[in-house]
Amino acid sequence: MLKKLRLKFVLINMSIVTIMLCVILGLVFYFTSANLEAASINMMQNIAANPLHLGVPNEREKDIRLPYFTIQLGLRGERIAAGGGYYDLSDTDFLDDLVNAVFSSPKQLGIIEEYNLRYYRSDMPLNHCLVFADISSERATLNALLGTCGFIGALSFLVFLGISILLSRWAVRPVETAWMQQRQFVADASHELKTPLTVIITNTELAQSNECSESVRRTSLNNIAAVSRQMRNLIEQMLELARADNARGKELSGKVELGKLILNALLTFEPVFFERGRMLEQRVIEDIHVQGSAEQLRQIVDILLDNAQKYSRESGKTWVSLQKNGKKRCLLTVENEGEPLSPQEARDIFKRFYRADKARSRTGSFGLGLSIAERIAMQHHGKIWAEGRDGVNCFFVELPCL
């Protein structure tokens, strides 16, 4: 699919480039041809207006001078005079052929292909003046220009083809990344659902067995209920992540007092920390307001506090702070004592279904919480990141404040 997408990108790009090159080079050729023709015709008209002025040596001419000659005809079509410094005009048959060719055409201006001449006929009351100009140099110039345009066009086509191939790789890279993430997400979700489904099927078959005792059947049903709740939590988190993805780019117009929101979340988690023998401290500035969804911002705080109480060391401390970060930003920090994350883990921990500690895969955590928090922070025009140092893991959320 990605190869087809890159191929389509290159084809569309090169189609546009080809059309533009043809139009640009075609216009260059057309205007050059028109200018040369206009200069030739202008010279012939000037000569027809003053046929006796054939030019004085070393005289500076105002317009271009091509090889030309004139033929003067009387009222009855007889030749009166022929003059010009570029041709041998002693061949009467040649001159008669030219005169016949001119008068056989109704046009005042035209080209005699046989002799490679352009003619201009000036009809006056007492005579006719025919001016002939050689166009071989004009055609040679146009042929040379045509070859140059062809060479430039071919070279430009190859250059743009190489650039398009490179650009296609660059343009498709986000799609490729999203595609790989989607495949990984499906594989990870399937893996997470496979184990509980196996447990449910096994316990169901055991409970349906005729040889199963009542106590074993009750235990099997309890296992099925527990694993079903675990699957429901996973599906709810996946739906929450999908909603967070779909909400990206939408404007949030609500005004939220972030300090008060964090303090309410801390009141909820204080019993949890106390029950697990962990300490919770806070340094929260209340008078900080942000624009967004209170429900989603509360979800970020809940995710960070839940991770802190799960992965803190025994009797470890957790510090929560909210403070201004410059004039227009605020910074939420959640720090907990525990095994510090490596720089690579601090980046990977926001990936879907990623767990820094694989042994904790069955604690009810599916590795989606921080992905959800990251999407919500991005939706609120903020960012979230993690750092591990000196036995403490720090999670930072920076948001624009009102």
Image (cartoon, rainbow, N blue to C red):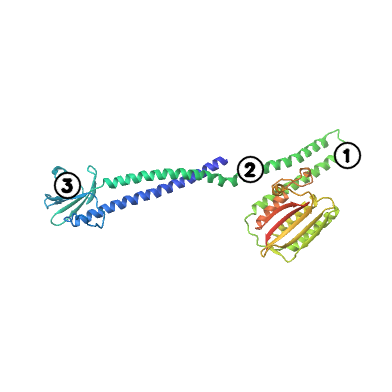
The amino acid pointed to by label 1 is: Ser
Check disc 2 and report its element: helix, strand or loop: helix
Q: How far apart are labels 2 and 3 at the CA level?
A: 79 Å
Contact flag, marks 1 and 3 (Cβ < 8 Å) = no
Residue 338 visible, this orientation: yes
Residue 102 place in picture, x, y as percent: 19, 47
Does residue 190 appear to the left or right of 157 in the view shown? Answer: right
- Mark nearer the N terminus (1 vs 3): 3
User: Going by the picture, which residue comes out furthest to the bottom?
Assistant: 287
Residue at x-position 15% and y-position 50%: 82
Say which mark, if any, is on residue 180.
Answer: 2
Q: Which residue is mark 1?
A: 215
Residue at x-position 33% and y-position 51%: 32
User: Going by the picture, which residue comes out furthest to the top?
Assistant: 211
Residue 62 place in picture, x, y as percent: 25, 58
Residue 255 visible, this orientation: no
| 10 Å crowding of disc 3: few (<14), some (14-19), many (20+) | some
Say which mark, if any, is on residue 331.
Answer: none
